[in-house]
Image (cartoon, helix red, strand yellow):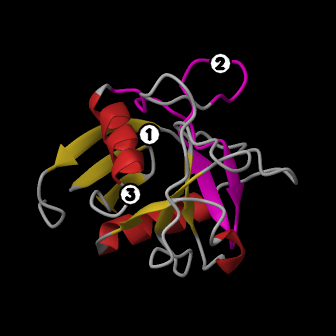
Amino acid sequence: MSVTLHTTHGDLKIEVFCESVPSTAENFLALCASSFYASSPFHRSYPGFMVQTGSPAAGGPKISTSVYGSLFEDEIRPSLRHNARGIVSMANKGPNTNGSQFFILFAPAPHLDGKNTVFGKLIGSEAMETLGKLEKLEADAKGKVKDEARIKDVTIHANPLAD
């Protein structure tokens, strides 16, 4: 299964690891299908590390919610690692605090293995080009993005290699 996040900076096509992390995949895909991520900002960015999104578009504090009505458990898999540019992983505030927020790596981050649930990876050259644009976003010392960058909408694909 794959999805394309249509962003203000280009498209990010993500292969979702449905069989390996079923609860995380179900949460992400249900949020995508419900348009939850439409207009969601990329609110944190650290060049050479990651960019984060997944909060509702409305103003106010950055929150993270799930389709389960509360935060849900990690699905840490030793075979799914933070080992490459383009890995997609759940953002959390400690063990078993997954919601809607996620991040995409700009570079390997092995220190996150065992702490955050990897649930996908970017696929295709266009996605990697868009990730490069997102890495150039201006952010302050705390990672708060100063530039306008949002998810406009999402397309869900049945085939990870579909256009």
Q: Residue at x 73, y 49 (%)?
A: 94
Identify which residue, 69 or 89, lies in the foreground.
69
Q: Amino acid at mark 3?
A: Val
Mark 2, residue position: 59
Mark 3, residue position: 21
Identify which residue, 20 or 139, lies in the foreground.
20
What is the x, y in percent for residue 162?
11, 61
Decide: is 87 above or below 35: below
| Marking on residue 151 | 1
Q: Residue at x 52, y 80 (%)?
A: 84
Quadrant in which residue 136 is drawn: bottom right
Alpha carbon separation for disc pair 3 and 2: 31 Å
Task: Rate crowding at label 3 as few (under 14), some (14 to 19) or many (20 or more) other CA atoms within 10 Å.
Answer: some
Decide: is 123 above or below 64: below
Identify which residue, 135 or 15, lies in the foreground.
15
Task: Identify the magenta region.
Answer: 35-63
In the structure shown, which secondary structural element does the residue marked by tag 3 occupy? Answer: loop
Q: Amino acid at mark 2?
A: Gly
Q: Amino acid at mark 1?
A: Ile
Residue mark closest to the camera, 3 vs 2 = 3
Looking at the image, can residue 136 be seen? no
* Magenta stretch: includes residue 50: yes
Q: Would residue 85 be found to the left or right of residue 61 on screen?
A: left
Of the image marks 3 and 2, the number of the one nearer the N terminus: 3
Identify which residue, 36 or 70, lies in the foreground.
70
Alpha carbon separation for disc pair 2 and 1: 15 Å
What is the x, y in percent for residue 139?
76, 51
Q: Locate the C terminus by quadrant.
A: bottom left
Q: Residue at x 66, y 47 (%)?
A: 92
Decide: is 139 above or below 84: above
In the structure shown, which secondary structural element does the residue marked by tag 1 occupy? Answer: strand
Q: Would residue 56 be found to the left or right of residue 141 on screen?
A: left
